[in-house]
Amino acid sequence: MAIWFESLIMALKSTYIFKNQNHLYYFVIEVGGELIVSEGDNFSLCQFQVNNWTTMITYLQYIQQTHCMRKKMILIVFLHLTFFGYSQTNPFQQRFPLIDRYIDSLMKTWNIPGLALGIVYGDQLIYGKGYGYRDLENKLPVQTATIFPIASNTKLFTATTACMLAMEGKLSLDKPAKTYMPSLNFFNDELNAKVTLRDMLSHRTGLPTYNGIWVASPYSRKETVEKVIYMKPQLGFREGYIYNNMMFAASGAVMENITGDSWEVITRKRIFQPLEMNSSFFTNEEMQKTGNFAHAYFEPDSTRNLKRVTYIAQSEALGPAGTIKSNIEDMSHWMIMQLNKGKYKGRQVVPDSVINETLIPNNIADREGRWNEVSNSLYGLGRIVQTYKGYKITMHTGSIDGYYSNLTFIPSEKLAVFVVHNSQPAGILRSVLAFLIIDRLLNISRTNWSERYMSIYLKDKADDIKNKDSIRATAVKNTVPSHSLKDFAGTYYNPIYGDMNIELDDNYLFLVFRKQRSPLLHFHFDQFITDEHLNGRSDFRLHFLTNSRGEIERISFRPFGDPVAEFVKINK
């Protein structure tokens, strides 16, 4: 080495920097017995691997003579000092190539077109990278600036702003929500008198999901919240945990009522602007205008060919529960603030007491404890608190329209990991996405989460096929509808879900509901079904009912998995 190299600048742990006779720097890292080399300022893109120092020297001599992309480093001293500081403050950089290789493998296994990863340590984004494609058809790559919907990772933003308002004395988390929004009405008097924002933000009201209210909804947030009165409890008040997007939407409406600002304005003023989250948005239209956003994909069949998701379930009414769109760069600011007791760039953006309030467990989210590596999860306000292999962590996941994300903090290690991808098949991995990274970052025992969840995924797919086959087997053959098809056509109304139209077109019936127009296939008697799995849309089974005069009057079905609801014909 002494003959060919002018000097060995430094050796930091297993990282070495060499300078050749042309003053071009090479960075060499020992990782798991392999040597990885990077030329000049392309350190973040290093891909070359050899397995011993002799081969390394031969390789460096070769690229000195032949590499056409060499660059003279003008500010050598600056680079020297910068890299020295980076190595001292970042004990994890040796793990990044391992993480890269693992993610590449994971994406192939799970058919993930594009993924973005951000790792924050202390007050720095120490690793941010895009993998694969944000647009598979046009081969546009994912970058750290690529915007993805973060879905339910929005909830911590909402809980944080609610706690800020509480700390300022503008509301109380523990007084009935109706105190601050008299027009908010629940199903019964007990809920009206007792439900607080703390209950709503920790999923302990006892109300079922009723996602059908907001999925692809035409309603405003005010109109959406007005439908809370129809949500019939499934559990007693504070008797258990039922994840509920509607309660977060309603919490946002309460904040709007007392501040006079929309939830979006509140979030932008209190969080986005002071954290310099200038590429974060609330609507799909805003996201798409940037040009650098990810499309989502699903597998319509067993061929593993991916198809772009076109049906958008998310609605602006959902807002506080899950409409933020962001990227690795912006989310790293949020992560830095959370890890540093509310501070960002030396400024107290969020009071430390607010961060602590969101961390207080209010509900048991997981009573069974599925895996030995993870403790039973407790729900604070907009986040889960649990342990992973002895480390206390806080985390949340997000899923909407084929996008899946995981944001996990390890406070004791001053670490945070954010992962987001655009593949429906890999959605099942969302709760453990960060664990795959954490095992490698902290160099702790590795659990094969991918293999474990693949077996669950394949079993679920097989069970789904069996269930569909068993339902088809119940169809009574050779039956016909009780009326001519034109008698089924018309507009049907439900006070929770609004209008649903049944159209007759060229002697076929079509369901028109929530941005979806689907052919109705006769099942048996007066029951019809849709078959939209190849198009990535929801399927429904409709049962038409008659009145005492024998006229088609109502439709009974489950909107988006909600409890059975009846729609009454209003256009006969």
Image (cartoon, helix red, strand yellow):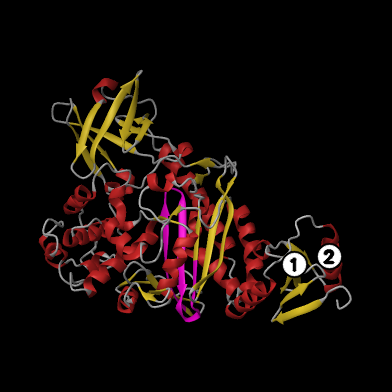
Across and down, in percent, residue 366 comes to: 38, 69
Which residue is at the front of the view, 556 or 155? 155
Q: What range is drawn magenta here? A: 392-417
Dot 2: element: helix
Above or below for 80 versus 314: below
Q: Classify 10 Å Cα crowding around label 1: few (below 14), some (14-19), many (20 and above).
A: many
Cα–Cα span, label 2 and label 1? 9 Å
- Disc 1 target residue: 37
Q: Is residue 168 left or right of residue 318?
A: left
Q: Residue at x 45, y 61 (%)?
A: 330
Is the stretch drawn in magenta largely helix, strand or loop?
A: strand
Marks 2 & 1, CB-CB < 8 Å contact: yes
Across and down, in percent, residue 457 comes to: 52, 54
Which residue is at the front of the view, 137 or 140? 140
The image quarter containing residue 45 is bottom right
Q: Does the magenta-highlighted stretch encompass residue 413?
A: yes
